[in-house]
Amino acid sequence: MPDPFVLLLIFVVATVLSWGGVRLTRRYAVQVFPSNIPTVKLEPAAGQRGGGLAMLAVILLMFMPLGLWISDPGPVVRFALTGAMMAMIGFFEDLRSMPRPLRISAQVVAALIFVPGVPITVIGLPRYELMLPYEIGVIASLIWVVGLSTIYTYMDNIDGLAAGHAVLVGLLWTYISYVEGNPLVTVLSLLIVGASLGFLFHNLSPAHIFMGEVGSSFIGFSLAALPLLMQDRSPRLIVSGMMFVALFVFDAALTFTIYIVRGKYIFYPDRSHLYQRILRLGDPPIRVTILYLLISVGFGVAGLIYWRDAAWISLVVVGLACLTLFFWIKRRERVEQPAPEQ
């Protein structure tokens, strides 16, 4: 395991480089990502996308040499190739909206570089361990990786939310991997924290720039990869990793389900996410971001408890919190009766 001072230095360098890189990107974002591109996203400054390019560059350019120094090349190269491909797919999406089936297919192909080497093979449940055949594990892992990569692109629509959440989840994995003695994941998660924090300085309300698909796809993939890289230390970490991002997954899954029920799942224009419904009720973006991050802190604590004790109550708390948020929003919508969306 690298010395704590070395880890601190890695974090500081990643943060500074990301901050500077995003600052540089802001000068050219409007020219590279014109605001008139058709998009389903609802960013208040749609032309200011592409901040994720700097995050991607910092993470991969630092992770490759550091990862090869402390670990076998296999997982390092597979992660870097898949991450770069996910980012490239997102980059094309930022430039010109891609048909959804084509985009998902491309992401699956990219994920097939990484997933077969670290498929989910066992899930640590409260009372027993669920063993998965290799083929089922690969399929489950593909759904997890592609799903979270996609989900993160829909959460990059509000000041500070996606980046702040990445900082939080990255810190959780930094702690877990350090305790479990996995230096590769410690370095990777710390790079995610540093790059996301450097970006966050430009993304706090009022946001000057957003990650764009290029950055949010890559960060979503990275956070999905961390529990897969850590599962050999404890099968409970697969569940903990899902708990860390449970609020984002619940928000997106609920929205997707609503569109399926309404027969509009092909278009899925991400205009009914829970956080967007709160915004339409008149809450400022910073309040919504703080609410989501505070809930995610609670989910992080629940995930840490599950990692240590596999306590079923942790799962119950996360589930009840998600349902409480949903019904709270529904009640506010009934009581406050906002004007219908034009």
Image (cartoon, grey):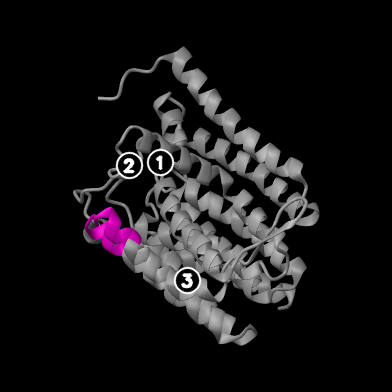
Whether tag 1 and tag 3 are in contact, CB under 8 A, the answer is no
Tell me the SS state at disc 2.
Answer: loop
Q: Residues within 10 Å of mark 3 (few under 14, many from 20)?
A: many
- Look at the image and tell me in which quarter the N terminus lies: bottom right
Residue furthest to the right in view is: 309
As for residue 157 lying within the magenta part, the answer is no
Residue appearing at x 36%, y 41% in the figure: 270
As for residue 98 lying within the magenta part, the answer is yes
Q: Residues within 10 Å of mark 1 (few under 14, many from 20)?
A: many
Q: Which residue type does callout 3 highlight?
A: Val
Tell me the SS state at disc 1.
Answer: helix
Q: Which residue type does callout 1 highlight?
A: Phe
Q: State which region is magenta.
A: 90-104
Quadrant in the picture for residue 327: top right
Position of residue 89 measured from the top left corner of the image (x, y, whole percent): 32, 65
Q: Which of pointers 2 and 1 lies earlier in the amino acid sequence?
A: 1
Position of residue 184 measured from the top left corner of the image (x, y, whole percent): 63, 75
Position of residue 158 measured from the top left corner of the image (x, y, whole percent): 42, 42
Q: Is residue 262 left or right of residue 63?
A: left
Q: Is residue 176 left or right of residue 68?
A: right
Q: Which of pointers 3 and 2 lies earlier in the amino acid sequence?
A: 3
Position of residue 147 measured from the top left corner of the image (x, y, whole percent): 45, 55
Q: Say which mark, if any, is on residue 265.
A: 2
